[in-house]
Image: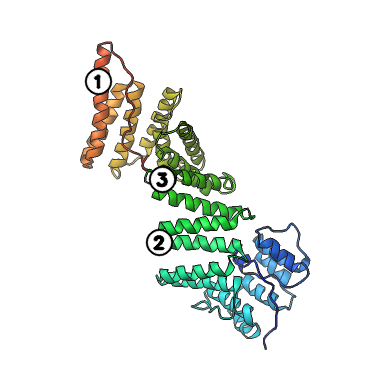
Amino acid sequence: MSMTHRLLHPQPLGIFPLPAGYLVIPAVDGGADLCASLLTGRVPDAMPDPLRFYAQALAGDADGAWQALERDPSPEACYNRFVLRSEPSDYARLRSELDGELHALLDLVAYTTGMIDRPPEPVGCSGEVAACILAAHAAHALETDQREVACAMLQQAVAEVRDISPLFAAQLLGDLAEMQVLDDDADAAIRSLHDALDLIGLYSLPDVRAHLALRLGMLYQERAEGRRAMLLEASKCYQEALRFYTRETAPELYALAQNNLALVYLAMPLTEASDQLRKGIAVQALREALTIYTRDTHPDLWRRTQLNLANALQYLPSANLRDHLIEAVGLYDDLLATRDLRHDPAGYARVLANQGNALAHLGDFARARQQLSEARRLFAVCQDADAIAGVDEVLEEIARQEAGSRKGEATAPALRRAPAGENGY
């Protein structure tokens, strides 16, 4: 015998991480107000006793949430208990007891937990319930490499909730953008992410906003190819992400955003006075990234970021150029101590070449020539003609400086870029 029920709408489905993202709010005193608050991403400091389970689920206390619902015989409570503890025996029983939207949501949870092979059809469902089911169909289609179907399902899901649950719609658009990237349609992905950020507006989900902004920044950066406008857009996105990410709350994402912001600024041509300031900000951003990327915890990321910092210091417009060059030489020494010459001769050569360039501008021509000559030998082994030409240019400059010095015609060496670092800087 089916349990009759009346489900409040719209529900905050899909807004918060599971299991809370699948829980429904019952039609009890305070339920409608709680739904309205959660739909904006705001979790009230206090909830009525019949709704305490939701706060516990959000806090990660699934057992406590289940216990808060243990004696509640309502259809919503039966469904919510299944979300919190999904047992096959309960699923078989509840399928005959629940009807309508709760029946469809029950099947959705069963699919998500692997009890059934396909998500339910959204027949008779609309709004946020239909959107949850359509999102599951998109995931199912993606598993079978039906990306066009997956995109269509997500677009339908967005249409279902755009006007009633913008935070859910924004997260669906973020998922859609990822699929569009898989289809090599970066323009569509950028549009989807902009749409998502517009929908979120100033709602209280800063972590979601930061994630979307970070992803949008990465797309702009990947497509920039030196174009100033796209690099500026990428920098705005990373700055937005860093309004939320901190060293304490999200260290990995904080370091990623800082590192990418630095690379964007370093890639910008010096065409305006503000660009010189950005180079200084880039150096500080790389230093911040290196507070997370250490030699022991993130060896590969540490090497790449350390190399980019050393390279950036060589070309940082500053009255303290000599100090920056000395620091860069030390950073290169640290990198050479961790490089494996046998397995990565090209990478080892790049560090040598960059260090040789810094030493040359410090006037340490003997050591500079030693490092550059070894770099040239390794580039020859790797058959990298462009890198060899770059090294030869620096060696020729050293020879000119030494000749001029013997004649008493000392001049400042012309700064140039040695072979690029691992991120292209």
Q: Amino acid at mark 2?
A: Leu
Q: Secondary structure at mark 3?
A: helix
280 over 256 or under it: above or below: above
Residue that sits furthest to the bottom in the current view: 1
Near mark 3 (Cα within 10 A), the count class, few <14, some 14-19 or many ≥20, is: few
Marked residue nearer the N-terminal end (3 or 2): 2
The location of residue 29, given as percent across then percent down, is 78, 69
Marked residue nearer the N-terminal end (3 or 1): 3
According to the picture, the residue beneath numbered tag 3 turns out to be 300
The location of residue 107, given as percent across then percent down, is 57, 78
Q: Amino acid at mark 1?
A: Arg
Q: Which mark is on residue 400?
A: 1
The location of residue 130, given as percent across then percent down, is 57, 74
Q: Which mark is on residue 381?
A: none
Near mark 2 (Cα within 10 A), the count class, few <14, some 14-19 or many ≥20, is: few
Q: Quadrant of residue 231?
A: top left
The location of residue 177, given as percent across then percent down, is 47, 60
Quarter of the image where the C terminus is located: top left
Q: Amino acid at mark 3?
A: Asp
Marked residue nearer the N-terminal end (2 or 1): 2
According to the picture, the residue beneath numbered tag 2 turns out to be 182
